[in-house]
Every structure is written in structure tokens, then in C-alpha cells.
Amino acid sequence: MITTVNYKDKLKQFMIILLPILVTQIALSAITFFDTNMSGKASSTDLAGVAIGSSLWIPLQTGISGILMGITPIVSHLMGSGHKSKVAYQIIQGLWLALVLALAVMLVGVLFLPIILDGMNLEPQVRYIAFHFLGYLSIGIVPMFAYTVLRSFIDALGKTRISMTITLIALPINILLNFLLIFGYWGFPRLGGVGAGVASAITYWCVFALAIFFVHRVKPFAEFNVFRKWYGLSLKAWKELLKIGVPIGFSIFFETAVFAGVTLLMSRFDTITIAAHQAAMNFATTLYMIPLSISMTLTILVGFEKGAGRLKDARQYAKLGISTAVLLSLITAMVLLLFGRFVAGIYSDESIVIELTQHFLIYAIFFQISDAIATPVQGALRGYKDVNHSFVITFISYWVIGLPVGYIFSEYTNLGAFGYWIGLIIGLIVGATLLLGRLVRVQRDQIIKITSS
């Protein structure tokens, strides 16, 4: 990364880092997108099974990945303050933590997944698909979390094109494996939605292998000698990483888990409603990659400037990121308004599913606008290493306000399944407002601290 002196330079630096992250995030989400989309082409039962499985998996995946993403602000601050020699040690500690967390998640799955699925009112075939989808997917948990650490290191150096390259190589592998294993082409077994889990697991191993190659062999990453010396476990280093990463992880977990919670609560509805809901939610999640990518970019840039003591530049990057996200959210809103039926048709050939999905997509518009403020603000706050308040705000907005309100609308009005979406929108609006207020306060306190010292 370079030091910028004017707004034009900042915009250029912002776009250089953002665009590869955006492509990477879209490609990563495309793995889930194609799992869902291609399963839906197999049957609505396969779509519903993968929907339930994904709803259980994604909160854990994003939450644990969020914890490991604490590596990004740590490395950004080390680079901004000129402590390059300490980076490799932090990466190895992150990999140890990734291994432990992955094994913990797998143990939880073995103990509680059957109980959770048995407690849901699922059709037998939907339950079968959900259980085996997750079972095969678990084969890729360790490499996926380890890749998150390596990717956070790569991105923290501003070399986001490398992450993009890795993901773009892996995506066609996932699509090909889906074709082979979901539909049974070229003599492979026709596994339906279960095949999507196998394909994703293999893809995660490929992504991890590519990341190891780049970090070990390609400059500037090879200069850090990450794998030249293998450090033992350090609880002190874990404490620093967890202090930053846990609030990040829980913030992301609470946000993604509330959407998963809605899907699980909607298991009382018929398979068609579950399939349509998940199709709309999957597309909304794909669009969410835009503000999420901006958020990750702001963590890198704000962290770098904060580490170097350039608070004015950090504030300018935050404003640039938030305004860009809002503008892009308005564009995606127009896309959903004009092409909602076409988008719904991507997920299913059944007319009733298409019609219901299109209705859900209208509500997704309000998701995009709220996320355009809340998500980049969280990224900027992480750059300042201010993560605890985001965690509390996210919990209150989604779980104290959003989900209960959605339940009330769904159960006690004639809105039915759409009531949950209205509740989530209300929670998102509250969260965006509170997070923006927190960012303003943090920036003001930073200025007061500098002027008084």
C-alpha cells in the first residue's frame, strides 16, 4: 500500500484494493449460490434440503471466519507501524487457532446436528439431504478456516488481486463438481443436493492449497517466511487475536444467524415457501458481497492509516467507503425492481416458486440499503480496532429487535412468511443508525486524544 495525499489518490487506492476483494467475495458466495441454484434445478426438495443445511452452516462459517479475520487489522497495524518482522508469528498463531476452531465445529456437528434436524418439522427427504449435505461439507472445514487466515494476511498487505486469483481459479472447479455430483454427468453418481456438499468440500481444499503456494513462493508474501519456522502455540498471541476477532466473529455471527434463524423458523411452512425464501435470501446474500467487500477494504485502509497515525486520512477513507456503498445499493435496488422475475427464474423452473421468490426479492431491496450503511461502518470500526460496541449493537438490532418483531408479524398478522422479512428490515435500520453514531464518536474521540496529547 502507498501513502495518499489527496482525495483522487485515495479513490484510486480504494478501488485498487476494493475491486479484487469484491470479485473474490462474489466468487466465494458464488459457491453457495451455485450449490443452491443447481440443487434447485434438481428439485424443490433438493433446494429446500440445501437451504436448511446452508442456514445451519453459514452462521458458523461466517462467525468463525470473522474471528480469524482479526488477523487483518493486526497485520495492517504492524505494517503501518513498521513491525514487519512480527507478521509471520501472528499468521502461524492464526493457523493454529483455525485448526482448533475447525475441530470444535466438527465436534459440535457430530453431537448436535441430528438433534437439531430431528427437532424441525421437515419432510424426511429434506432432512436426509440437509444432513448429508452438511456431513460431506465438513470434510472441507479445516482448509476453509485455514484459508481465511492466509487470505487475511494477503489482503492486509493490500495484495487483494491474489485472493481474487485464487478464488477465480477455484470457482470453475466447484461448478464442474456440482454438475458431476448433483446431476450425475459423465458416469458420476447423481447425488442431488448432497453432491453440492461434496463439491464445496473439495473446492475448499483446492483454495487452501493455492493459498499455501502463493504465501510460500510468491513475492512479497515469501519475504515474510511464514512457513520457514513453525512456532508453537502461544496463548498470549491467541488472546490478542481473540480480543479483536471474537467481537468481529460474533457480530458477523449474529447478523448471519438471524437470517438462518428465520429460515429454520419457516420450516413450519411448506417446501415451496422454504425454497422461495431461500432463493431470495441467497440472491440477497450475493448482493451483500458489495457492502461486505467495502467493509473489508475499509478495515485494511483505515487500519493502515490509523497505525501510521494519519487520522484525517482514516476518516476520509471511511466517508469514501460508506458513500460508495450507498450509491451501489441504490443501483442494486433498481436491478431487483426491474428484473426480479428474471432473477427468480434463475433458481427454479416451477412457476409457483418463481412468483413467490419475486415477492420476497422486493423486501431484499430494503436489506441492501440498510446494509450499505451498517456493513462499511463496521469495517471502518474494525480498522480503528473498535469492535466491542459493534458486537453489542448487532446483537440488540437483530436478536432483541429484528427477530422478535418478525415473529410477531408472522404469527399475529396475515403477513405470514413475509412478516419475518419486515422484522429483519426494522432490525437492520436500527443497527445501521446505531453503528453510524458509534463511528462518529470514535473518530471524534481519536481527534480529542491527539490534540490533548
Image: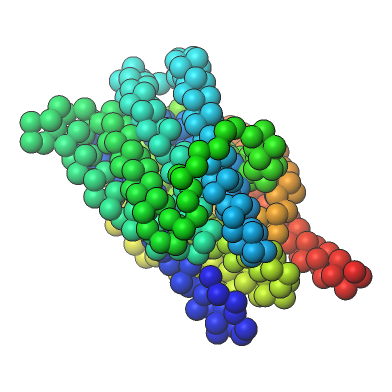
Would you place residue 111 above or below residue 409 in this image? Answer: above
- The residue sitting at the right extreme is 452
Determine the image quadrant of residue 420: top right
Residue 276, given in percent of the width and then of the height, sits at 37, 41
The answer to whether residue 301 of the structure is visible from this angle is: yes
The answer to whether residue 283 of the structure is visible from this angle is: no
Q: Nearer the viewer, residue 69 or 389?
A: 69
- The residue sitting at the left extreme is 187
Residue 22, given in percent of the width and then of the height, sits at 43, 61
Would you place residue 32 above or below residue 261 in this image? Answer: below
Residue at screen point 67% across, 33% down: 235
Q: Report the colour scheme.
A: rainbow
Residue at screen point 75% across, 49% down: 389
- Image quadrant for the C terminus? bottom right
Residue at screen point 59% across, 79% down: 4
Q: Is residue 346 left or right of residue 17?
A: left
| Picture mark count | 0
Q: Nearer the viewer, residue 336 or 15?
A: 15
Residue 145, given in percent of the width and then of the height, sits at 47, 38
Q: Is residue 199 left or right of residue 292?
A: left
Residue at screen point 50% across, 55% down: 224
Residue 191, given in percent of the width and then of the height, sits at 21, 27
Determine the image quadrant of residue 287: bottom left
